[in-house]
Amino acid sequence: MNHVQHLVSAAGGLLHRRDLVGAGVRDRQLTAAVRTGTVRRPRRGWYSTWAPEDPRFVAVRVGGRLTGFIALAPLLPWSADGRRTPAPITVSVPRNAARLRPRRGVRVVYDPPRVQDRGSEWAVHPRDALARAIVDAPFDEAVALLDWAMHSGALTRGDVLAAVGSLPEDARGVLDWADPRCESYPESIARTRLRRAGHAVRPQLPLPTGERVDLLVNGAVALEIDGRAFHEATFERDRRKDLTIAASGLVPLRVSARMIATLWPQVVAAVERASRTRSHGRRSAWVRAVRETPGARRRWRLRRSGPLPAPTW
């Protein structure tokens, strides 16, 4: 690694010419480094060790900085879970920007000075990226982004509130749907979709063993979402957890993150069927208990023409 490459790499992969000159690098060294390919020049005055297809390199070459979901990607632990659609490269530029280099497949957005005053050389501040991502994303993904921001601690509470406060007025209600208890992207997506379908959902239900159920749906179904491919090391542990769930009187249902993304109608149909089955089973048990209680037959005959009282357990 030559001197120029070392300086650029140490700076995170991007450095301006003035900083290199200030470090003692001469023009002929910069020219030689570009010719040999040890560094690249995405834009006049800038030198980088990133690959040309790297979104950060693309943003600098266009003349701005990354924003939206693509800017948050390095902070998100979702790479193994996938998304509904690939995140587009969105580049933030000042409102008075000129001499841009548009590129096919890259979206350019014009942001006010307050956005340009914070962030890094290649990306806007995470709170501005979050605000842009919420506006651009489908509703369930926007909620998932807020869940992540509040749960992970990657942004402060003030940053999250500032991001939501900068949204258009009709979009600020997304905060009412967020829940910092959700621990993963597919878990959050499933929770929001089930809530929008009218189901009662509680995240992170504690079990007697100290473990937690990802989502409790309708007080009946324990929905577990496996965020990664099968691993033999967790197989027995997951089966023991399913036994604990069943012993607690709930219906265990385990799905993968890929199923949440690609087979959602089947997932929600299974949840609804399991909810109805357990509700029917509980009511049947209540009916049998009433019928078998001494002195209750007369009361049962009076009640059977009307709706059954709700069970108390």
Image (spheres, rainbow, N blue to C red):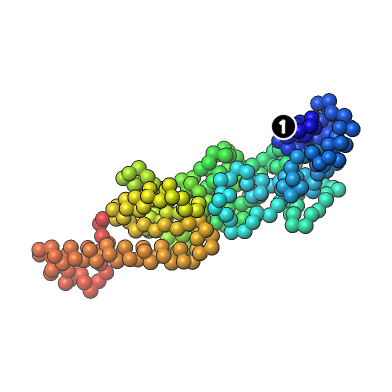
Residue 252: percent from the left, percent from the top?
36, 57
Q: Quadrant of residue 5?
A: top right
Judge by depth and name the residue closer to the eye, 229 or 182: 229
Residue plotted at (70% across, 52% down): 89
Residue 94: in sight, yes or no? no
Residue 212: in sight, yes or no? yes
Residue plotted at (57% across, 54% down): 82
Q: On the rendered structure, is 9 left or right of 22? A: left
Quadrant of the snapshot with the C terminus:
bottom left
Residue 17: percent from the left, percent from the top?
83, 34
Judge by depth and name the residue closer to the eye, 25 or 118: 25
Element type at mark 1: helix
Q: On the rendered structure, is 4 left or right of 191? A: right
Residue plotted at (23% across, 74% down): 305
| Kind of residue indicated by mark 1 | Ala
Quadrant of the snapshot with the N terminus:
top right
Q: On the rendered structure, is 166 left or right of 143? A: right
Residue 238: percent from the left, percent from the top?
39, 50
The residue sitting at the right extreme is: 28
Question: Are there few (<14), some (14-19), or many (20+) residues within 10 Å of tag 1?
Answer: few
Judge by depth and name the residue closer to the eye, 237 or 193: 237
13 is higher (above) or lower (below) than 243: above
The residue sitting at the bottom extreme is: 305
Q: Tell how many labels.
A: 1
Q: Quadrant of residue 160?
A: top right
Residue plotted at (49% across, 66% down): 265
Q: Quadrant of residue 34?
A: top right
Q: Which residue is mark 1?
A: 10
